[in-house]
Image (spheres, rainbow, N blue to C red):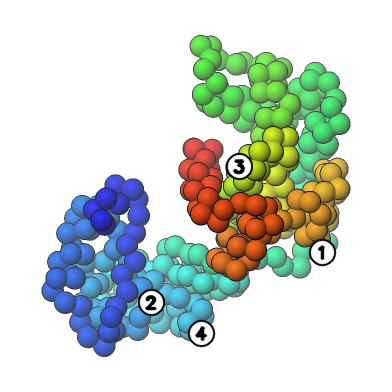
Amino acid sequence: MLERLVGLHVALLVQPENPARAAGGETIAHARRLRGLGMRIALDHNDPGPWLESLLPVADAAVFRMGFCVPEEVSLFACAIARRQPDVAVWVWDVGTHDDFELARSAGCSAFAGGFVTRRDDWKGNSLSPHGARLASLLDRLHRGVETQEIAQILKHDLALAYRLLRYVNAAGWGLNHHITSVEQAVVLLGREPLQRWVSMMLLGSARGVPGAGAVLEVALTRARFLELLGALRGERDPAAQLFVLGLFSLLDVALKVPIEDAIRPLKLSAAMRDAILDRRGPMAPYLELALALEQGDAQRVTSFADVLGVEPGELTRLQFEALDWVQVAEA
């Protein structure tokens, strides 16, 4: 069965039966063969010992779980791996805070996962950047239905944004047989709702210089697309588009590093969307709660909110994969 995953850019996480004993010859040979076919082999968290050392020569990475240890031990683990097998990377899981992330990164670790990506800190006193404020103002005008010409003029006053819009339109596969060369043409071609979505994505990604911003954007886009697909599954049309925006803006404060109230204030969101984002209440809240429960792996809450929405839990994994596929295409 594992050979069917070859070529899909997956990593096989190998766990020991007995960390105090070296892996058997059959296990080592199997790992070497799969790696030769292109699958990455990662060794789950274990102290350096017979099992870990026996598999390091056929591994691509060793995983350190911060949730199992004092965070500072990551440096000792990384050094131990480097001494035994310098070409094996160290991946870190259960990274809870930005300080933990910096600690692991300074230790030479190369991949990270954990709640630090969407962790909220005290951002009081921070405000939207000038670029972010312009995007928020543009979104407000789009929501109010101002004329296309006025929208085009606003875009043309931001050369970088106008360039990105033209690049997006000409690369997005609209079936065009000629290049779009003016902002006015691009605005008309996209239409108001797709343009709102694009500007929303630009707003969320406007802090790309901040460490981890790309990861936050990926999580937000995945959440947004998942909620949109969930709304469509339930037969909702206009609300499905609103659910995309809900998922996207539920992480706007994390992306921009400003308090959530300040982040969404210029956007003039609907009351239902504001209630869901700020207080987790109202008709849109169960959608957001379900997405959060899935991300956190909370099976009990997943089942609870799936029941509230009348959705089969088995459908949710399919929607997650579809959302992830969509994000890969969108980012490209």
Q: Position of residue 179 (x, y in %)?
A: 55, 15
Q: Residues within 10 Å of mark 4 (few under 14, many from 20)?
A: few
Residue occupying the point 53% across, 71% down: 95
Give the residue at mark 1.
124
Which label lies toward us, 2 or 4? 2
Q: Looking at the image, is mark 3 or mark 1 earlier in the sequence? A: 1
Disc ID at residue 70 = 4
Q: Secondary structure at mark 2?
A: loop
Q: Looking at the image, is mark 4 or mark 3 earlier in the sequence? A: 4
Which label lies toward us, 3 or 2? 3
Give the residue at mark 3.
233
Q: Looking at the image, is mark 2 or mark 4 earlier in the sequence? A: 2
Please name the amino acid that badge 4 sits on.
Answer: Val
**Residue 126 at least partly seen:** no
Q: Secondary structure at mark 4?
A: loop
Residue occupying the point 66% across, 18% down: 189
Q: Does residue 44 appear left or right of residue 163 in this picture?
A: left
Q: Secondary structure at mark 1?
A: loop
